[in-house]
Amino acid sequence: MKRDWRQALKHHYTATLEQGFRQFRQGVSFFFLGMVGLYIGQSLFEPSLTQELVVLASLLVGGAGFIWAMMAHLRMLIGRLIRFFSHSDD
């Protein structure tokens, strides 16, 4: 049973770099979308509840995108370390 989750974790981290870059690009895109929404909310709306809701939604999207991109970055980093140390053992 322990081998199953370890194998799944290793499979996740040793996925192709294409998959990691795709996840990273998605995260950066959401982050950028959130920052554009934040700029629009601050510059186009008068101070009101609508402005606050737009800013809140933009911060949530941008924050989620940032976390998504950082998770992808760590996935690629850990995958490279796993590949490096598994090839040096051979």
Image (spheres, rainbow, N blue to C red):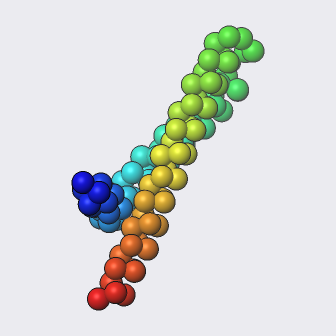
Q: Nearer the viewer, residue 30 or 42?
A: 30
When asked about the image quadrant of residue 6, the answer is bottom left
Decide: is 24 above or below 33: below
Identity of the residue drawn at 53% across and 33% down: 61
When asked about the image quadrant of residue 51, the answer is top right
Q: Residue furthest front?
A: 1
Left or right side of 32 for 86: left
Image quadrant holding the N terminus, namely bottom left
Q: Residue furthest right?
A: 47
Left or right side of 38 for 12: left
Q: Which percent across, then down, holds residue 41?
A: 65, 24
Q: How many marks?
A: 0
Q: Residue furthest top?
A: 49
Identity of the residue drawn at 70% across and 26% down: 42
Identity of the residue drawn at 43% across and 59% down: 75
Decide: is 60 above or below 48: below
Image quadrant holding the C terminus, namely bottom left
Q: Which percent across, then down, holds residue 13?
A: 36, 61
Decide: is 38 above or below 83: above
Q: Nearer the viewer, residue 47 or 72?
A: 72
Left or right side of 61 for 18: left
The answer to whether residue 36 is seen in the rendering is no
Identity of the residue drawn at 37% across and 58% down: 20
Q: Which percent across, then down, holds residue 38?
A: 64, 31
The answer to whether residue 38 is seen in the rendering is yes
Q: Which percent across, then down, holds residue 50?
A: 64, 12
Decide: is 64 above or below 79: above
